[in-house]
Image: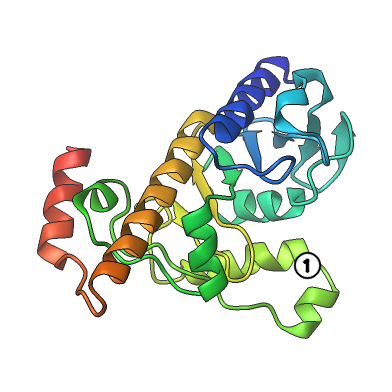
């Protein structure tokens, strides 16, 4: 079932690891077939260099695991994002050192460079922390809920990544390969912002006209 998609998602997971955006078995990329109402995700607890496409899990949008090994522990968050963001076809959960720093600090990633502005039309937002009740029940689904909340006044297509406070960040796109690319650019943006704030505390971010100019040029 979905053998071609499994292979593309497997490739994307391997690339995530090669880019240094995964830690042993931590991190995951999924890809969806929206026409069939299904998505594919890596199995839980398997190092990235040991992944096999045939072991990937196939899950429907009603949260039924249809095929494959035990899915990655974050699969319910992936499902929540597919349901919240109708235009996406892939999700990456990644572990870049700098973006993890912003997650630990519970802070959004400001725009300090045109490289950031080309790929994210504004700050990469940070979610709120989960309540005790949300942690105790439906933890993974509730992470997805906080991500959706963070984009109530933002465009998830113009800013295809999020800092999950106290957890690992997510990125998304139409394809698994592009979701990994967005994760890589989000990590670069976080690393740049961290360096800028370290070198010059209180440094203002790029102006809105500058961000819009670069974004328009990149998407023309």
Image quarter hosting the N terminus? top right
Colour scheme shown: rainbow
Residue 89 coordinates in the image, percent (x, y): 55, 37
Question: Which residue in the structure is indicated by mark 1?
Answer: 139
Quarter occupied by residue 52:
top right
Residue 220 coordinates in the image, percent (x, y): 17, 37
Residue 208 coordinates in the image, percent (x, y): 16, 66
What is the crowding at mark 1: few (fewer than 14 residues within 10 Å), some, or many (at least 20)? some
> Is residue 104 found left or right of 68 in the rendered image?
left
Residue that appears at 66% across and 18% down: 7
Q: Is residue 28 above or below residue 81?
A: above
Q: Is residue 217 above or below residue 103?
A: above
Q: Secondary structure at mark 1?
A: helix
Of 191 and 5, nearer the camera is 191
Residue that appears at 50% across and 39% down: 179
- Please indicate, yes or no, whether residue 76 appears anywhere in the rendered image: yes
> Is residue 93 found left or right of 156 in the rendered image?
right
**Residue at the far front in the pictured view:** 199
> Is residue 122 found left or right of 211 in the rendered image?
right
Quarter occupied by residue 61:
top right
Q: Is residue 98 above or below residue 71?
A: below
Q: Is residue 93 above or below residue 42?
A: below
Residue that appears at 38% across and 65% down: 109
Number of marks: 1
């Amino acid at each position: 079932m979905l053998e071609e998609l499994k292979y593309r998602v497997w490739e994307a997971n391997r690339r995530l690891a090669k880019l240094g955006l995964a830690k042993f078995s931590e991190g995951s990329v999924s890809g969806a077939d929206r026409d069939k109402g299904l998505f594919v995700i890596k199995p839980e607890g398997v190092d990235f260099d040991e992944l096999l496409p045939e072991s990937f899990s196939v899950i429907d949008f009603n949260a039924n695991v249809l095929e494959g090994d035990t899915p990655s522990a974050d699969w319910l968050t992936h499902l929540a994002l597919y349901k919240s963001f109708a235009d996406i076809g892939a999700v990456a959960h990644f572990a870049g050192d700098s973006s993890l720093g912003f997650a630990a600090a519970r802070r959004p990633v400001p725009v300090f460079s045109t490289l950031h502005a080309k790929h994210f039309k504004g700050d990469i937002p940070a979610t709120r922390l989960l309540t005790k009740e949300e942690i105790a029940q439906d933890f993974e689904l509730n992470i997805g809920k906080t991500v959706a909340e963070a984009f109530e006044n933002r465009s998830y297509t113009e800013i295809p990544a999020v800092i999950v406070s106290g957890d690992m960040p997510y990125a998304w796109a139409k394809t698994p390969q592009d979701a990994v690319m967005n994760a890589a650019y989000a990590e670069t943006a976080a690393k740049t912002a961290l360096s800028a704030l370290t070198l010059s505390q209180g440094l203002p971010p790029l102006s809105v006209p500058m961000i819009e100019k670069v974004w328009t040029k990149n998407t023309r």
